[in-house]
Amino acid sequence: MVLPKRLARFNRIFTNRVLGLLTPRLPYFGTIIHNGRRSGRTYRTPVNVFRVPEGYVVALTYGADSDWVRNVLAAEGCELVTRGRTIKLTQPRIVHDEKRSAMPLPVRLIIGLAGVTEFLYLQPA
């Protein structure tokens, strides 16, 4: 079970606009900058992001079929603004991990309650 699509719509319209102002500077948060597959429009999506040895990982709380994930996969990369820096990321890949091993323990427990088992891994360009 991932979070409901209605919640995703609400977050996209309201919560993301507020968080979008904060996520580029907060630890464990970031903003993914990606282009629409069909429109070519630039989008900014606030995410929880964590550093791992091979790059960065994002828990896919709304699943791998979210528009922003599909955009990043189609473009084979994106930009991440985190802690005041912009990082170009490439080689996106979805990993199914029921143990949520890349997540810090508190996050692992919280996303475990929501049944999140898919993650997007990205490498710095």
Image (cartoon, rainbow, N blue to C red):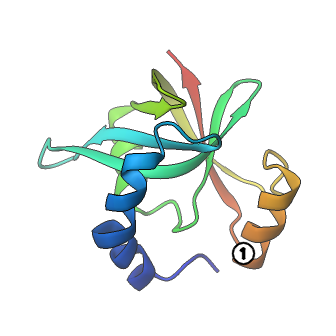
Which residue corresponds to the image point at 72% horizontal and 75% vertical from the top-left? Answer: 115
Near-viewer residue (98 or 50): 50
Up-down relation of residue 116 to residue 104 (above or below): below
Identify which amino acid the numbered label 1 is placed on: Gly
Marks counted in the figure total 1
- Left or right? Give the position of 48 relative to 54: left
Near-viewer residue (112 or 23): 23
Could you tell me if residue 98 is visible in this image? no
- Residue at the farthest left position: 39
The residue where tag 1 is placed is 115
- Left or right? Give the position of 3 relative to 22: right
Up-down relation of residue 119 to residue 5 (above or below): above
Quarter holding residue 122: top right
Which quadrant would the N terminus be assigned to in this image?
bottom right
Which residue corresponds to the image point at 32% horizontal and 46% vertical from the top-left? Answer: 44
Near-viewer residue (91 or 49): 49
